[in-house]
């Protein structure tokens, strides 16, 4: 029986560096956007739905980077490298959607977010689908270790995101954002309180 080739740890270090740059840009975008509310409190009115999704994305991006630690055990190819870089780039794109360079054509974050919600939630659904691919890349044992709650989580996010595209009701939008934030924090803490 042939043994699998040894995994060169330097390859993952190289991949991790590139993904770290993209993840760092994502977190930087969110933190810079949040800092604007403190720097110029009268310039843009805080919109609770947008603010909660900002915190969700901050948790989700940090969770993503921790999740990617499992890729240290993967046999790397250029295709996998491109996938990982693309996946991280989608997070950056979502973060820039939350805090665009300018909002001159909008009345504020409420008007902006609601008009761009189909893009935001559509791309968010894309991240969940990429998450499934990423999970399978980490191997069958890893998929099994996540249990059925992983699939419940994915179904919940996809269905709720589709509804968020279709429903403009502010109570629904805020409720989904709040539930998603709490769920993401709870999910991350339940899985990743240790490295093992």
Image: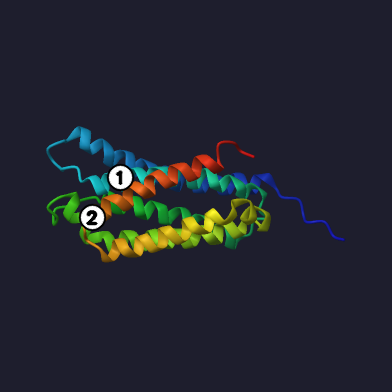
Q: Is residue 43 above or below residue 89?
A: above
Quadrant where the N terminus lies? bottom right
Disc 2: which residue: 113
Query: Which residue is depicted at the point 50% across and 39% down?
Result: 189
Give coordinates of residue 159: x percent, y percent.
39, 63
Q: List x then y, in percent, for residue 178.
A: 33, 46
Horizontal relation, residue 38 to residue 182: left or right: left
- The label nearer to you, 2 versus 1, is 1
Q: Which mark is residue 124?
A: none
- At 59% from the left and 36% from the top, the residue drawn is 194
- Secondary structure of the residue carrying numbered label 2: helix
Q: Mark 2 or mark 1, which has the lower sequence index?
A: 1
Residue at the right extreme?
Answer: 1
Compared to residue 71, the image places residue 83 above or below, namely below
In space, the residues marked 2 and 1 are separated at their CA atoms by 12 Å
Q: Is residue 115 visible?
A: yes
């Amino acid at each position: 029986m042939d043994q699998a080739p040894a995994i060169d740890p330097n390859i993952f270090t190289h991949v991790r560096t590139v993904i770290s740059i993209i993840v760092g840009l994502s977190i930087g975008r969110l933190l810079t956007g949040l800092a604007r509310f403190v720097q110029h409190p009268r310039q843009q009115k805080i919109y609770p739905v947008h603010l909660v999704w900002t915190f969700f994305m901050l948790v989700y991006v940090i969770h993503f980077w921790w999740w990617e630690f499992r890729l240290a055990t993967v046999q790397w190819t250029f295709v996998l490298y491109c996938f990982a870089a693309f996946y991280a780039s989608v997070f950056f794109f979502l973060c820039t959607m939350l805090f665009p360079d300018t909002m001159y054509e909008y009345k504020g974050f409420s008007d902006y977010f609601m008009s761009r919600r189909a893009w935001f939630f559509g791309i968010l659904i894309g991240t969940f689908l990429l998450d499934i691919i990423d999970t399978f890349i980490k191997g069958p044992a890893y998929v099994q270790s996540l249990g059925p709650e992983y699939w419940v989580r994915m179904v919940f996010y996809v269905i709720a995101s589709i509804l968020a595209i279709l429903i403009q009701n502010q109570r629904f939008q805020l409720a989904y954002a709040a539930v998603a934030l709490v769920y993401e924090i709870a999910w991350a803490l339940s899985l990743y309180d240790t490295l093992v």
